[in-house]
Amino acid sequence: MSREPAGTPAVEVRGLHVALGGTPILTGVDLTVAVGEWVTVIGPNGAGKSTLLRAVGGLLPAPKTITLFGTPSAALRRRDRARTVATVAQSPVVPPGMSVLDYVLLGRTPYIPTLGRESTADVDAVHEVLGRLDLAGFHRRELATLSGGERQRVFLARALAQGATLLLLDEPTSALDIGHQQDVLEVVDQLRREHGLTVLATMHDLSLAGEYADRMVMLAAGRVVAAGTPSEVLTEELLATHYRASVRVVPGAHGPLVVPVRPTRP
Amino acid sequence: MSDPAPTGRPAGTPPSSPRAEPRTPARPAGLPSGARPAGLRLRWLVAGLVAVLVALVVGVSLGPVSLPPGSVAAELLNLFPGVHLDSGLTEREIAIVTELRLPRVVLGLLVGGLLALAGGCYQGVFRNPLADPYLLGVAAGAGLAVTAAIALGGAGRQGTLSGLPMTIPLAAFAGSLLAVTMTYVLGAAGGRRGSPAMLILAGVAVSAFLSAGQTYLLQRHADSIQPVYSWLLGRLATAGWHDVLLVLPYAALTTVVVLLHRRELDVLAVGDDEARSLGLHPQRTRYLLIAAASLGTAAAVSATGLIGFVGIIVPHTVRLLAGSSYRVILPMSLLFGGAFLALTDVVARTVAAPSELPIGVVTALLGGPFFVLVLRTARRVLT
């Protein structure tokens, strides 16, 4: 299951420092994601997971310490970066009245000339993506009327329509019930295998995270405290230290399963 | 290691990715045809143009001397080179059409279109259904600047407003930019992203502040500033071709800039982070569009004074009828806004004939209740 990064990595972060409004959020983070790999960042609330993802996605003033597919992120033009990296935010804005087709078509923005409009090729590309995500019948539906699971697929579809090979998923399952969580992660994994996508995600559900990730990175207080295969990172000691959680870790078929156990009172 | 920067195609791009062949996908079988992206449908464009033409003919026909609409239409067609129709109107009636009523109606079309376009644009830029040139204080800023130019600069010394220098809209533009900047900064003071309600409250405060400045100027220069009073309530009554020429260049610039960015406004609707990750400069786009909408507002205010609520009524009606994409809202607001104001002007000059109601009073009477309706539907966004 473990795979050592080889060749030009999809993402390379070296000693990343980010401060927001004077508060240091990330203090010297290293991260490498190989092409085709699925890496999930975990960590307690406020550890800086989302900030790390935003930095990699080019949403923060780009430091020189982030390299995407061998090119410093700061050297990429916005449109080129948008063709390389697609982000699905934790809870994307759902504009009232916008149809699924129009929403997913926004993903074609980096291919549409400034001040221009979509070509039929863009519309066809979107229909192709919708078909791939079992959303073929949904194109006329209003995004706001869809269920949580359907919406998450549409958000994914927008990211895929972007044609990016690096997918950043910030808490892709946080709004979903357990069945839809598995559903969405299976879709992502299938797309990754079929299209060679690279996935960098943040997740709170540790068992689920461990079942899908090739490697995991644990952040705490703005720095990496553990990195490796799920069974190396999801240990009772690490989770007790950094999450202050009382858990039992049980070996599972696809990765360790983390079961919360009520702490015994002294 | 190859450097992918020039093409944006980094190493390791698998050939099967949709990016590799973005322009040549085969349409999978069984996909519904006729699913088209948001955009202006022909039937709505036709409806908007018809509304403008109806407003034009009705606006020119009605007045103290009523003229038959058919004759008016013929006379309007005669304005095009190479057209010679017999309208059956006398010389005097033709003069009423071309020198008195036509400039007034055309100015109404221009100003109404501009105010509605600016309203729709502000709503998109600020992601705020209540944004409008008046509620943001932009109109008050333009009004103060025009008043100052007349009181202190001596523009309009002849005792009328006709004959204002062509640069008056530029003074108004400076005032409107000052106002919108104040509103934006104040509205964001509650946090990095001020809430929609904060922005509107800031606009109300800025409006009140600038209006106080204007009242002060009016008090201090009561003698030289008589004409400003009628202008304050909105006027189309004294419009001549000069006013049309005053507005036209700025109207054209605003319209072109805003309409060219209609798709960008749809991208902004999904949020700044999303827009940025789709390759846009959200803040740069926002500043440009705020400037364009403020220029349009400034030109409208310079020519016709304070006419409120058009920027709320028209874009929201369009949104209800034709959909929420700015690719539809903006061009339709331009057309329907023009028709709306020109027809409102007909009401303003006929209901209390022979005297005229100030047009700003009529739009406020219509707009007040409409605003309450918008407020009710926008409650979810605002809280």
Image (spheres, rainbow, N blue to C red):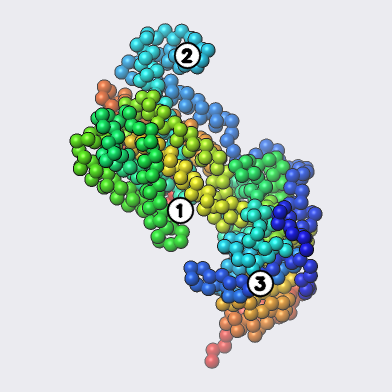
The answer to which of A209 and B126 lies nearer the viewer is B126
Calculate the distance from the C-alpha at mark 1 to the C-alpha at mark 2.
52 Å
The answer to which of B250 and B109 lies nearer the viewer is B250
As shown in the figure, which amino acid type bears the numbered disc 1? Arg
**Residue B109: quarter of image:** top left
Q: Is residue B131 visible?
A: yes
List the single residue furthest toward the bottom.
A266
Which residue sits at x=37%, y=8%?
B90
Whether labels 2 and 3 belong to a single chain: the reply is no
As shown in the figure, which amino acid type bears the numbered disc 3? Arg
Residue assigned mark 3 = A14
Residue assigned mark 1 = B380
Whether labels 1 and 2 belong to a single chain: the reply is yes
In the rendered structure, the answer to whether residue B28 lies left or right of residue B355 reads: right
Which chain letter matches label 1? B
User: Where's residue A190, x and y in %?
Assistant: 76, 60
As shown in the figure, which amino acid type bears the numbered disc 2? Asn
Which residue sits at x=54%, y=89%?
A265
Which residue sits at x=64%, y=68%?
A65
